[in-house]
Image (cartoon, grey):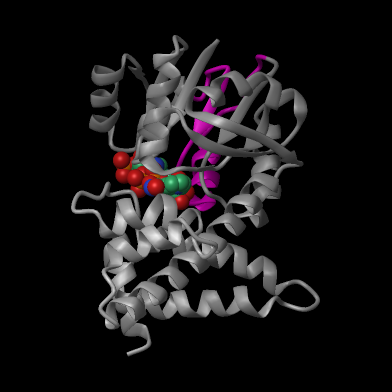
Amino acid sequence: MRVGWIGLGAMGAPMAARIAGAGFETVVWNRTPSVAADHAERHGTHAVSFEQVARADVVFSCLPTTTEVIHIIDGVTERSEPDAVWVDCTSGDPRDVRAIVDRLEARGFRYLDAPVSGMTRGAEAGELTVMVGGPRRAFDKAEPLMRTFGDRVFLLGPNGSGYLMKALNNMLFALNFWASAEALACLSDHRVDPVLALEVLNASSGGSNVTRRFVGSEVLSADPTPAFRLGQLVKDVDIAAAILRARPVPPPLLGYTRDLYHRLLDLAGTEADARGAFGAVQEVHG
Ligand code: NDP
């Protein structure tokens, strides 16, 4: 089976490397060609033209938003081989699913939305969580490939389920991140060492996956991995908020979280890292 990969960014590069490392023939394409050439040299993939990458048996994309995904698909020509599958690992917008399905079906692909959670570190270690929406037949074909970078791969329902799951996951991440920043700031004000406070939270009922797996390594650590960008998180918060707002009674807490994060974005900027965003949470209330 020939695998194609489009988008070798912070997530796409290690995910494509895991597929190649598992022995699958992997061809890659990136908007900036030197990135693909470098990937090929380091990871045993093959840098090819856009036309060639789109002719693989299973094509993966991992781009900033579904807007770029739709734009990319518009450049793909119709194929005649049966059973091709397109797996989009972008943290995308479920409201774009119809446009993607229509475009991919017209070009001869079945489609899975398959965003991931676990950051670059998780991708490198093959320990991502993969949230998949789409038809079972396409899932069965792509699952062995997704298992090279994800140790938990879930088929959640029809197309769009994966994007929706990811957006709500990141909304909850945002909520927990904010609450952790407020709690640790308060403890610091009262001269409780944040490292010690985090240890207590992580051994107690107030701890969460955010305090256990993120705040220590990405905020308090002297050597964080550059995995977090505030703008990327707010993109997912916005997707979740738009869907929640459409409910008959919009949930107040999650709607409020969106407003808080837009104030944070004004203050800290889209490129703020985890430490910068964590610190800026205090200023929002200053
Ligand atoms: P990056 O910004 O690191 O990479 C983006 C990739 O998309 C690059 O390969 C870039 O190419 C390409 N690209 C951007 N715009 C276009 C375009 N118009 N046409 C073609 N290619 C384009 O993003 P990440 O890898 O961090 O994120 C990718 C997705 O994964 C996002 O949806 C993100 O929310 C999600 N995600 C990110 C995580 C993280 O920790 N970073 C964790 C989990 C999910 P070029 O090299 O030319 O710029």
Q: Is residue 85 above or below residue 182?
A: above
Q: Nearer the viewer, residue 49 or 274?
A: 274
Residue 273's spot in the image, x, y percent? 29, 60
Q: Is residue 72 left or right of residue 160?
A: left
Instruction: Determine the residue located farthest toward the left in the rendered image.
Output: 222
Residue 64 part of the magenta segment: yes
Residue 77's spot in the image, x, y percent? 56, 28
Residue 24 part of the magenta segment: no
Q: Nearer the viewer, residue 259 or 109?
A: 259
Q: Is residue 257 left or right of residue 211?
A: right
What residue do we see at 20% from left, 49% from top?
223
What residue do we see at 41% from left, 18% from top?
27
Quadrant where the image shows the N terminus? top right
What residue do we see at 53% from left, 39% from top?
89
Residue 57's spot in the image, x, y percent? 58, 17
What residue do we see at 40% from left, 61% from top?
200
Q: Is residue 83 visible?
A: yes
Q: Is residue 71 above or below residue 231?
A: above
Q: Is residue 64 visible?
A: no
- For the magenta stretch, what is the residue range? 54-81
Instruction: Determine the residue located farthest toward the bottom in the rendered image.
Output: 286
Instruction: Determine the residue located farthest toward the right in the rendered image.
Output: 248
Residue 262's spot in the image, x, y percent? 44, 77
Q: Nearer the viewer, residue 187 or 35?
A: 187
Ligand 1's image quarter is top left
Quadrant where the image shows the C terminus? bottom left
Q: Is residue 251 left or right of residue 93?
A: right
Q: Is residue 252 above or below residue 80?
A: below
Quarter of the image where one finds residue 193 = bottom left
